[in-house]
Image (cartoon, rainbow, N blue to C red):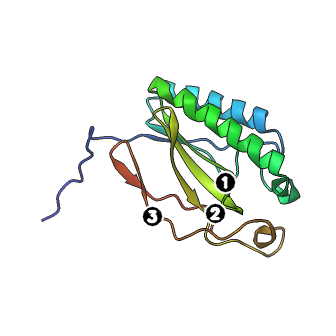
Amino acid sequence: MMTKPSFSRRDTFVLALAQFNPTVGDIAGNGEKVRAARAAAAGQGADVVMFPELFLAGYPTEDLVLKPAFVDACRAELEALARETADGGPAVLVGLPWAEKDRLYNAFAVLDGGRIAGVRFKVDLPNYGVFDEKRVFDVGPMPGPVELRGVRLGLPICE
């Protein structure tokens, strides 16, 4: 017998997808696009708004991610955006370069409740055509799902 899946907080989970064209290197401008889309998603009753891979940095980042100051600026913007989620509005799923333990990852962050609630790293780095990710990023560990507002989500990054 099939049973209807149930969510812990309510019977719906609304995911808004924000497909913008971020500007490579314009971290503040890309952050403003996140804020505008989050406000629009809030007006539509979304629980979360999701952005593309490396959105805060712009894509493709190429050698910009090899500059620690650039990666640090992305992290600072992410932390500011995370603090803004304390208002109870939609959570945010957004991509950025992430430095950790002398490694650099193509990452996806979960922002909710005023904090960075989770981070997952890209596992399959393309290295063909215009893609040169194996040169600049480390392969992340196989990710598991994240829990967001009572719902388990998988966060695949690109391929």
Q: Quadrant of residue 65?
A: bottom right
Question: Does 64 sit above or below residue 77?
Answer: below
Is 34 placed left or right of 58 in the picture?
left
> Nearer the viewer's eye, disc 2 or disc 3?
3
Question: Does 137 sit above or below residue 53?
Answer: below
Which numbered disc covers residue 158? 2
User: Among all residues in the image, which is located at the extreme front?
Assistant: 101
Q: In this figure, which residue is indicated by the disc labeled 3? A: 144
> Nearer the viewer's eye, disc 3 or disc 1?
3
Q: Quadrant of residue 131?
A: bottom right
Q: Earlier in the sequence, mark 2 or mark 3?
A: 3
For badge 1, the amino acid type reads: Glu
Q: Mark 1 Cα within 10 Å, few/some/many (few <14, many 20+)? A: many
As helix, strand or loop, the secondary structure at mark 3 comes to loop
Tell me if label 3 and label 1 are in contact, CB under 8 Å: no
Question: Does 52 sit above or below residue 87?
Answer: below
Which numbered disc covers residue 128? none
| Residue 31 x, y percent position in the rendering | 70, 34
Residue at point 51%, 58% (across, down): 155
CA–CA distance in space, label 2 to label 1: 7 Å
Q: In this figure, which residue is indicated by the disc labeled 1? A: 53
| Residue 33 x, y percent position in the rendering | 69, 33
As helix, strand or loop, the secondary structure at mark 1 comes to loop
